[in-house]
Image (cartoon, rainbow, N blue to C red):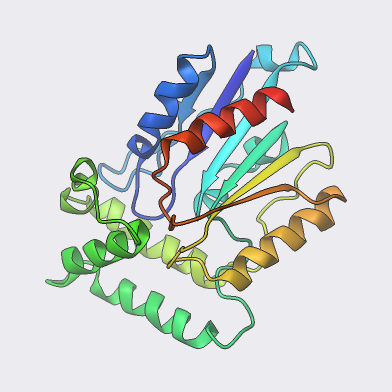
Amino acid sequence: MKQVIAMHGWCSDGKYWDIWAKNFKSHEWYWESADRGYSNGQMLNPTWAKKTYSCSKNKRVLICHSLGTFLIGSEIISKASHIVFINSFSRFIPNSKESRSLEIGLKGMQKKLRTMQEQKMIYRFWEKAFSPHKIQKVNIELFKRNLSQQGIKKLREDLDLLINSKRLPWAINKKTKVLVIDGEKDKIVVPKAKNNLIEEIYENIGSDPEHWIISNEGHVILQHQIIEKTRIWLEAN
């Protein structure tokens, strides 16, 4: 059995993975998208199917975008046979010259939630996330939707997760195979934070992860061929 559990990042939802899921399902993968519940307050927390443990050739693949690594349960990340980190980090605010401005920016975002500036702030976030591309029409719902009271609370709490993140929340199994995918022009996660993630993965599994840097792509990677390339890598490793 080939199973994927995918976790979106801040201010997103399970629909983020729809195109990925369609590709994987067409090649006989079992796909489940987790959801933090920002819109309706209802979380969706998939678990590994028991049958994935029945054979060593079966695969339990965790795919996380950005903050998603911190939003998924410890049982999921610790028992994954493969992990794909997409524009992820272990420490969002690195010890570097950008640290103070990053913290100020995140705290400013917190203050704008539930104010007249909320929608503009969320739009600006997605504008940076999609850069160097323009926001696609199919993704407009991400910043036009009505966020629930519980959802706003979670958004605030998860900005604290960004501010206070120091290392990966749970140790990766040393046998886990890891793929890191980074957009070359990511305007959300700074290069130092990406480098820290690579170093921490090495410390946990004792070898360098597979690392792809996608040219002319930002925090949200839009090239559909990357989905296909990722699936082929997972099937071959």
Looking at this view, is 54 or 74 the one in front? 54
Q: Is residue 82 above or below residue 96?
A: above
Looking at this view, is 78 or 130 the one in front? 130
- Please provide percent x and percent y for residue 151: 30, 52
- Residue at 63% of width from left, 36% of height from top? 76
- Please provide percent x and percent y for residue 6: 50, 35
Looking at this view, is 77 or 215 the one in front? 215
Count of all numbered marks drawn on residues in the image: 0
Q: Is residue 199 above or below residue 95?
A: above
Q: Is residue 167 visible?
A: no
- Please provide percent x and percent y for residue 99: 54, 83
Q: Is residue 44 above or below residue 27?
A: below
Q: Is residue 59 visible?
A: yes
Q: Quadrant of residue 152?
A: bottom left
- Residue at 61% of width from left, 68% of height from top? 193
User: Farthest left residue?
Assistant: 116
- Please provide percent x and percent y for residue 107: 38, 78
Looking at this view, is 2 or 116 the one in front? 2
User: Does residue 9 appear left or right of residue 98 in this picture?
Assistant: left
Q: Quadrant of residue 168?
A: bottom right
Q: Quadrant of the C terminus?
A: top right
- Residue at 25% of width from left, 41% of height from top? 40
User: Farthest right residue?
Assistant: 206
Q: Quadrant of the N terminus?
A: top right
User: Does residue 14 appear left or right of residue 197 in this picture?
Assistant: left
- Residue at 75% of width from left, 50% of height from top? 171
